[in-house]
Image: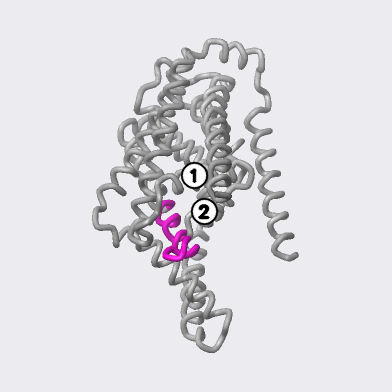
Amino acid sequence: MNKKAANIIKYTLSGILAVVLVWFAFRGVDWQAFWEGLKQTRWIWVVLYFLAAVLALVFREERWTALMRPLDPDIKRLGVWDAINVGNLVNVVLPGAGEFVRCGYVSSKRMSYDKAFGTIACERLSDVVAIVILLITALALKWESFAPFFAENIWGPMAGRMGGSLPWLLAALAVLLAVFFWAVFRFRSSVRLFAKIADTLKGLGTGFASVAQMERKWPFLLSTLGIWVMYVAMMFCTIRALPMLDTLTLTDALFLSAVGNMASVIPVPGGIGAYHYLVALSVQSLYGASWETGILLATLGHEAHAILIIVLGVISYVRFSLRKKK
């Protein structure tokens, strides 16, 4: 009951945060201007957007398969594909829960649940590195435009809230984690709970280190590159779909993609609200476009991706259920 209550509180707070962010993003929108802009959309670019989004998922399946292959040589690509799609579908409603769900889909006798989760942790770390590289690349290409915006609207508010306490908080967290790990492995033979935690941590470590066990690391690296090239292509297609943003270039798509993906770390269902606000703010501040244009860009990209995730997630769930029944 306590676990259920904690989950209810967590997802309720997540939903409230999403509502607040949506309100901030959509308040003051001139809906007539919004719909007029939507009527001008070049839908061929939306079709290309869907193609890039599907390719991003294909690369993601390839990368996760490459990570899990050393742990379970019999892992099936179709099973990995279905696990990713169902996990994404769950994330639309319950942010973060999809990662746990897809671990359950691929775990087996050879690869335990905690090892599968360790591979996801490795995936997420590589994605964080990719976002940082995207951001640094975009800042370097158009420093005079992007750097002031990033400093004022993203880095400044984050640093302002933390003040000078961030180094101390990180140091305290490091000490607490070190003491925790020492206690777990020091007393695992005498404390049953610590023994279970130690086994789980070992499994996570094995999954996380799976990248070192791969015979060929190029599939992992090229798949990661492919994922993020497709994400930038998705943003570029969304930009090209709107005539009022014709002046934007591939470099602008690079920066907007990095900013949009930063919104994914905010724990709200499907990133709704956070993504819209950051993208609309970027478009308005950097390019002098109206807030309605920024919201239209964010809504077009976000909702197209949500539709794709829901369709593929339902198909994969049905296929997995039928396969399990057989």
**Residue 198 against residue 278 in the figure, above or below:** below
Overall secondary structure of the magenta stretch?
helix
Q: Position of residue 323 (x, y in %)?
A: 53, 47
Camera-side residue of 74 and 105: 74
Q: Which residue is found at the position 32% from the left and 38% from the top?
A: 137
Q: Is residue 25 left or right of residue 257?
A: right
**Above or below for 167 versus 41:** below
Q: Secondary structure at mark 1?
A: helix
Tell me the number on the disc at residue 99: none
Give the residue number, with chain letter if any, for mark 1.
82
Q: Is residue 157 visible?
A: no
Residue kind at label 1, given as amino acid type: Asp
**Count of labels shown?**
2
Q: Is residue 23 above or below residue 183?
A: above
Which labelled disc corresponds to residue 105?
2
Q: Residue furthest bottom?
A: 190
Residue found at x 34% / y 58%? 73
Direction front: furthest residue:
326
- Would you call the spot at circle 1 few (<14 residues within 10 Å), some (14-19), or many (20 or more)? many
User: Would you call the spot at circle 2 few (<14 residues within 10 Å), some (14-19), or many (20 or more)?
Assistant: some
Is residue 148 at all visible to an observer of this figure? Answer: yes
Q: Quadrant of residue 239?
A: top left
Residue occupying the point 40% across, 16% down: 247
* Nearer the observer, 304 or 15: 304
Residue numbers of the magenta segment? 108-124
Q: As drawn, is 35 to the left or to the right of 65?
A: right
Asked which secondary structure carries label 2, the reply is: helix
* Image coordinates for residue 180, horizontal then vertical, percent: 51, 76
Is residue 93 found inside the magenta-colored segment of the image? Answer: no
Residue at x 44% of width, y 57% of height? 121
- Disc 2 to disc 1: CB gap under 8 Å: yes
